[in-house]
Amino acid sequence: MLKNRHIQGWLQASPLTLVLIGFLILPILTIVVVSFWRATEFSIIPDFSLENYEFLFGSSVTYKVFYATLKYAAITWALTLLIGFTVAYYLAFHIRSQTMQIALFLLCTIPFWTSNIIRMISWIPFLGRNGIANSALQSWGVIDQPLEWLLYSDFSVILAFVHLYTLFMVVPIFNTMTRIDHSLIEAARDNGASGFQTLRHVIVPLTKPGIMIGTIFVLTLVMGDFITVRFMSGSQKANVGRLISNDIALLQYPSAAATAVILLITVLIVIGILLRFVDIRKEL
Amino acid sequence: MEKRPGSFYVLSAVFALFILFLYGPTLTIGILSFQGPTGGLTFPMRGVSLHWFRDLFEQQAVGDIWGAFRRSLALGLMVMVTTVVVSVMGGFAFRKRFYGSGILFYLIIASLVIPSILISLGVGLIFSQLGFKIHWATSGFGSQLTWTLPFGLLIMFAVFNRFDKSFEEAARDQGASPWQTVRYVVLPIIAPSLIGVGLFGFTLSYDEFARTLLTAGSYNTLPLEIFGMTTNVTTPVIYALGTMTTLFSLLIIGAFLLTVWVLGKRRARLGSDAGKGV
């Protein structure tokens, strides 16, 4: 009986399965159920009511906030892709010694293992009204008045997203690039391709799986975020995550749950589309 | 050696700027945490002092920082050990291609992409509806695992995809039992990667915010405590705390990386040169 690989496999995967059932599947199911409940000021009442969704879809705030969320996601994606691809390309094709490659790669990844909150806080002395950026620009005579939009604005939110999440592009893209057979690049060159043509027609297509995985990471992290937007906008901007967390703060759990369900569906649709372009299991 | 193309120098400059972008802000608050007692949140420095660090150790008006640190440390270690054990077992399981492994794989991916506030909200709701008390070591612990386990498993998949099965076959041919094969052949080979899994487990837990927000209960973990401070503390004491936690993280990262490096050296020294040719 224990020789059966299916049973053995499930036994070995059982702790994993239990954690995922208890802390992933059940919580999501609970959210779906609670999204149909009703709430008073003090408690939540089991029910089957569509009022949370009716309110959600009937409010213009919802559409604005979803638009803002997608806008943050799109801009952050474009910037992280551009920077991430460039950095990965440099590491994979311009650094010749492997030791150096590993060292520089680690240099890029270390911030990922430190606190996101601290990394957000650390932008304050840069972007504030009397911060480094404003003083520098003023002393160079570029501006007369301090720029007000540096901190607590869409700019600072996106800057923080790029700061926190570019790494999620660098790692998968670098990983795919290091597996590109260098003879393909030599072949392109021997056939007369310019550096840019090689990049455009050989490297980019071969790097697509890494780009897709990085895209999945960045989009889901930005779409599900609430803390970066809250902190970096000084509570002046909103995205879907903040809508949820505000409802939670007001103990309006059913309403928070309904918003969460719509957010989840949005994220899953995006991921579903992206997964059509990449087989993650093959890329590991 | 081939001559460097012009693009190399341009890209080197871009890379240097990227590194400055990554580390610059953290270094800045590192410097500002040594502000003099009358200094503010931005430059100029009004003297250099350890005033704000002393503040951290003395007054506790801003909350229970040290208690939060101890809880985060304990939770990080719990999550680390669990992540390593569960990921290794999961990694072994997935080598068997059992029925339903495809579904489980997609669940792992789902765990990675689901917005963390959903986990926080859902786990919080379950605990409150069932009448359990939320606590960092129960609900917080489980919620964090949904973030650390996918990373651990992805590393294990990558490791086992590159694993040379002939080592196991050789062990079996020499009469090793399945357990002996795992204990004396497979585990030593994958040990450096396990340290990597441990690093992810600890640091992701130690810094986690969103998943513990609604699941930590009445006792805050360190990131929650720090976030609480951002709303009501307007002195460089928050930079001092940031610098301390970052240094602590760097220490941990350094320890893990050093272990991997030492293991690699040891392996190179003790390894056989069989098959390397004359």
Image (spheres, coloured by chain):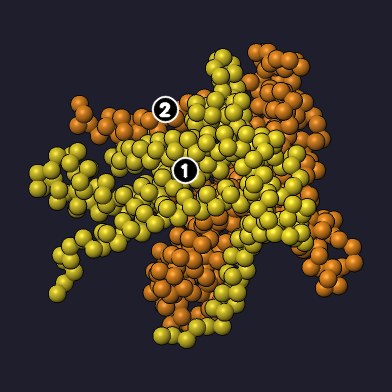
Let me know if residue B113 appears in the view.
Answer: no
Which residue is pictured at 81% across the width and 63% down the height?
A134
Residue situated in front as seen by the camera: A104 or A175: A104
- As drawn, B1 above or below B117: below
Q: Is residue B201 visible?
A: yes
Looking at the rendered structure, the kind of residue marked 2 is Leu
What residue would you read off at disc 2? A18
Q: Tag 2, which chain?
A: A
- At x 22%, y 31%, the residue is A4
Q: CA distance from mark 2 to mark 1?
A: 21 Å
A227 above or below B14? above
Give the colour of chain B: yellow
Residue type at mark 1? Answer: Phe
* Residue B144 x/y as whole percent: 51, 35
In the drawing, what numbered circle is on residue B202? Answer: 1
The chain letter of the orange chain reads A
